[in-house]
Each structure stands twice: as structure tokens, then as C-alpha cells.
Amino acid sequence: MESIGQDLHEKHPRMRGEDRKALILEQAKIIFARKGYLAASTGELARASGITEPILYKHFGSKQKLYLAVLKKLSEEFMQRLHALVERRAANDLFESLTNLMLDYRNAGMADHDNIHLLLNATLESNDPEVAQLAQAHNRAMYALVYGLLKQAQKQGLLATQLDLTAAAWGTLSFLFALQYRAKANIFSEYNEKTIREINRLWLQALRTG
């Protein structure tokens, strides 16, 4: 009888270290999104990538470190997608970028549903201070993007000069985070593009009048 190790080796032939790590991260994302941090076992995480648990530990050291690596990768990928969408519009028309910010945020999230689910629930599911720090870093990156966009708009006279940019940025984020919860509940179809555009329009109108 062939050993489990032999079966796994045949399923996933020898790979370069970085390629193996990328595969583990991708499969772990699926498992964590489906089962949550606490319920996902290291054995299940290893099997999903066609490796043994010792190999999993060799690459990441622990389940917690693997989880952190997955979250960091998802945060970076999400921010890259969002930056690309926002900056593409802003390069042509800053006002258009502002009027489509919430829609671009939704589209960046819908590109990878597991991304939104994991980032939203990471702190609650793991109850881990390092995960909480990573989630806070993600939120700060979001804040920096929105604040920078609003600051440019204020300089160009698109927003009221007396507008408190800090309050406006956090207010905008509250709408964006609400979209995350709807993504988790799979009700984007009820919270459709038309509704999102109208919410964005009303919020932007409030910012312009101060």
C-alpha cells in the first residue's frame, strides 16, 4: 500500500518553495473563509494543498502565522484593486472618482468574495491581538486612500472649504464598511448598483455643501 506521503507527492509534484507557499496561501484562504479560523484544522489546511502538516509548519510555523499571512495577502490584493479603480477615474476626472467611490469599493470586494468575508470577520473569529493589529492596519490604509482623495477634491474646490476632512473620511468609510456586511450576507443583489450610486450621490452632496 502506498503511503499518504506518496499519494500527496504524486498529487502535487515537487514545487519551488515560493510556488508551494503561494499554493498553501490560496488553499488556506478557501478553508478559512468556509470554516472560520477556529474550526479549520492544520490537517485540513495541509490536505487542501496536498502536503503534510510538517511541511505546512515548515513554511508558516503555525496556523496563526498562516492565517496572518493569508489576511496580509488579501488586504494587499484588495487595496491594489481599489487603488487601481480609484486612480484610473481620478486621473481623468476627480469628481467622477468621488461619485463612483462606493461602487468601485464594491467591485473591488466582489472580485474575491473570500477576501471580504475574511477581512471582515478576522478579529472576531480569531480573538488574536496580532490579527486585530493587521485589521487595524487595513482600515488605516483605507482611511489614507479616502482622506487623500477628499483632500485633493477640497483643494480643487469640489468640496466645501470648511469641511472637516477627518470626519468626512471616517463617515465615508462607514458607508464602505456597510457594503462589506452586505457582501458577507450575500445581499449585494438587493443593495444594487442604482442604490449604491444614489447613496454615494447624497453623501457627496452633503460633503460639497459642508
Image (cartoon, rainbow, N blue to C red):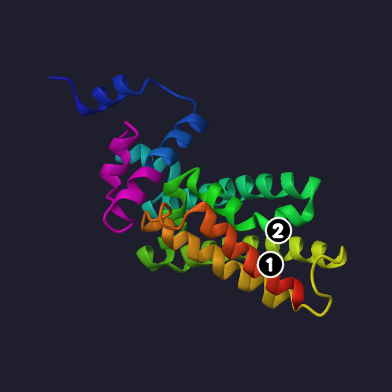
Left or right: 175 with respect to 183?
A: right
Mark 2 Cα-neighbour bin, 10 Å: few <14, some 14–19, many ≥20:
many
Residue 48 part of the magenta segment: yes
Q: In this view, does 140 lie above or below 19?
A: below
Question: Is residue 180 a member of the stretch shown in magenta?
Answer: no
- Give the residue at x 17% y 20%: 2
The image position of residue 125, as x and y in percent, is 36, 63
Whichever of labels 2 and 1 marks the residue nearer the N terminus, that label is 2
- Labelled pair 2, 1 in contact (Cβ < 8 Å): yes
- Work out which residue is located at the far left of the displayed protein and give it: 1
In this orientation, which residue lies closer to the viewer: 27 or 199? 199
Instruction: From the viewer's perspective, tell me whether residue 145 is left or right of residue 134.
Output: right
Q: Residue at x 68, y 57 (%)?
A: 99
Quarter of the image containing the C terminus? bottom right
Q: Can residue 130 be seen in this view?
A: no
Residue identifier under label 2: 98
With respect to residue 209, does 29 lie above or below? above
Residue 14 picture location, percent across and down: 41, 22
Res 168 → quadrant? bottom right
Above or below: residue 62 compared with residue 138: above
Residue 111 placement, left or right of 167: left
Q: In which quarter of the image is residue 5?
A: top left
Mark 2: secondary structure: helix
Circle number at residue 18? none
Residue in front for this viewpoint, 60 or 23: 23
Question: Which residue does the numbered mark 1 point to in the structure image?
Answer: 204
Q: How far apart are marks 2 and 1 (CA)?
A: 7 Å
The residue depicted at 39 percent of the width and 57 percent of the height is: 184
Q: Which three-letter amino acid code belongs to the residue tagged 1?
A: Leu
Q: Give the range drawn in magenta.
A: 29-52
Q: Where does the image place residue 92, in percent across and percent down from the top left?
A: 80, 45
- What is the crowding at mark 1: few (fewer than 14 residues within 10 Å), some, or many (at least 20)? many
